[in-house]
Amino acid sequence: MTKKKSEEPVKKQDAPAKKTAAKEKLILYEAVQAHKTKNYIIVGALSSAGLLDQYRYEESVYGKEDIEPSITMDELDNCIKKFLGE
């Protein structure tokens, strides 16, 4: 009886590190619109973080001018948690 040569398991190739949705920079206006928290809570959090003027500016020029992405969803979550005291 001959033994079959056992096959070595196929190694997964290391995939290049992808940006996760939470780590990807977004336009502040888009991040607020995509967030699951109510907008009035987010506006309060942005105000306490000093980002309300930036949000209002981006809201006024959104779709008319190019806006540089400036915030990640994690950063927005942290602003909201600090505002709510969590």
Image (cartoon, grey):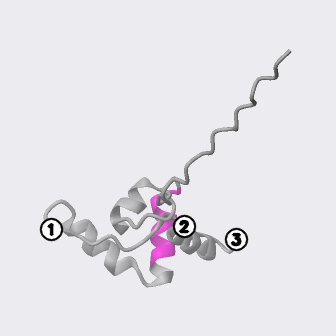
Circles 3 and 1, Cβ within 8 Å, touching? The answer is no
Query: Between marks 3 and 1, how big is the CA–CA gap?
Result: 36 Å
Q: Is residue 32 magenta?
A: no
Q: Residue type at mark 3?
A: Glu
Task: Assign the magenta stretch its main secondary structure.
Answer: helix
The crowd level at tag 1 (other Cα within 10 Å; few <14, some 14-19, many 20+) is few
The residue labelled by disc 2 is: 74
Q: Which residues are magenta?
A: 37-46
**Do the residues bearing badges 2 and 3 touch, measured as CB atoms within 8 Å?**
no
In-image side of 32 versus 81 (left or right): left
Q: Which residue is mark 3?
A: 86
Q: Position of residue 18 (x, y in %)?
A: 47, 58
Q: CA distance from mark 1 to mark 2?
A: 25 Å
What residue is pinned by disc 1? 65
Looking at the image, is mark 1 or mark 2 earlier in the sequence? Answer: 1
| Most foreground residue, 59 or 16 | 16
Q: How busy is the neighbourhood of tag 3: few (under 14 within 10 Å), some, or many (20 plus)?
A: few
State which quadrant residue 57 falls in: bottom left
- Along the polypeptide, which appears first: circle 2 or circle 3? 2
